[in-house]
Amino acid sequence: MEASHLILLLLVGYIVYTIDIHAKWFPQPPVLVLIGLGLSFIPFFGEVKLTETMLYDVILPSLLFISAYKYPPAALRKHAGIIALLSTGGLVITIFLLGIVIYFLVNPFASFSLLAALVIAAVMSPTDPVSVTAILKQSGGNEAIADLVEGESMINDGTSIVIFTTLVMMISTGASITFWSVTKEFLLVSAGGILIGLLFGWVVSRAVHYTHQKEFQVMLSIVLAYGNFHLAEALGVSGVLATVTAGIMLSWEFTHTNKEDHYREALDGFWNIVEPTLLSVVFLTIGLVASSYIDGELLILSSGIFIFSLIIRYIVVGLSVASIPSVRSMFGLKESFIIAFSGVKGTMSVVLLLILETKNADNIDFIISVSFFAILLSLIIQSFGIYPLSRKMIKSN
């Protein structure tokens, strides 16, 4: 991406964020994607590309860190059980059930393996609450729903990429992997990322009190967000979980010290600018490159995958909520449906597709096309639909 492209995309993002006074009805991420689709027909933007390095190594650590350090520790303690269940066992069940459904949906039209279907299901598993959590809080409903959705998203990003990586290794190498080997790898990668995040989050939360200049405090947060992520990745563990854990550690420090020294205000002043800047670039670029990935002939199939992903997520959310008495008393069937519908697919799903693009295996192009279309449907339909849906369901209580 050239500097001229970047500046124009930032200008478009600035205009959208500035004039979008009805963000509840027209949330910025899908608006930016649709604008990007329109801009893709302008030859000037024809050379804009979306790469795995750009998304995974440059943009994702910042977005993960921002979500984590802003997430209130009290909400994490309150919803820890249901967040852990949905982000681990619930996610595995979702991928398995959706994979089976996709397998039977695709096979009448093309020869397709169950493993390839599971890869698509894994791509559709991570959630991206960039727009929906703010909308849920503005809808006048149960703010706990927004906290749960946001907390689940932070953790399931790490879980989904571990599962996805294992499935892709199987499909690209033909290797036979046992349940125990997958479980061992999952626990090692996850635990390693969490431990690194705890260690570096603790170190930075202490070091900041010896740094009185706000500018240098912000520099420390940048080092934490990126250094933590890339160190974990270099060690072969989850950079996603490392960054999320470090951000949560920093958030916990804000609530357990009397020496904050306005550190949080300094962080907010910087990262509140970084977040819309990165989101503008990401979602506009997704729209710009969408036409090269999606195939109109796959609309019906992608729509089916999108619809069944919602149905299965609702079933898993409903059963997970019902299995924990304290959570069951907070959320009924309507709240469970809103939680399920809030599971918008976004940045992490696109990252997984870009990783998949670098692999050599049968049906890769088909998997990418049908998945990208389903992701776009989720991002646009669910983001636009969550406000009127939540308002209607809450009012009918």
Image: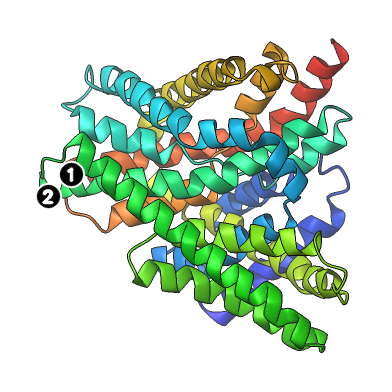
**Up-down relation of residue 164 to residue 191 (above or below):** above
For label 2, the residue is: 173
Q: Is residue 156 visible?
A: yes
What residue is rendered at 56% in x and 17% in y? 323
Q: Amino acid at mark 2?
A: Thr
Q: Amino acid at mark 1?
A: Met
Q: Where residue 32 sits: x, y (%)?
A: 66, 52
Q: Quadrant of residue 281?
A: bottom right
Location of residue 72 in the rendering, given as x and y in whole percent from the top left corner: 76, 50
- On the rendered image, what quadrant is the C terminus found in? top right
In the image shown, does 179 or 37 lie closer to the viewer? 179
- Taking the image as shown, residue 13 lies to the left or right of residue 154, namely right
Q: Determine crowd level at label 1: few under 14, some 14-19, many 20+ residues with C-alpha closer than 10 A.
A: some
In terms of image quadrants, where is residue 267? bottom right
The one nearer the camera, 38 or 13, is 13
Residue located beneath label 1 in the image:
170
CA distance separating discs 2 and 1: 5 Å
**In this view of the protein, which residue sits in the foreground, 139 or 189?**
189
Instruction: Locate residue 44, reporting x and y percent.
Output: 53, 69
Q: Position of residue 67 (x, y in %)?
A: 67, 55
Question: CB under 8 Å between callouts 2 and 1?
Answer: yes
Secondary structure under tag 2 reads helix
Q: Eyeballing the image, is 90 above or below 314?
A: below
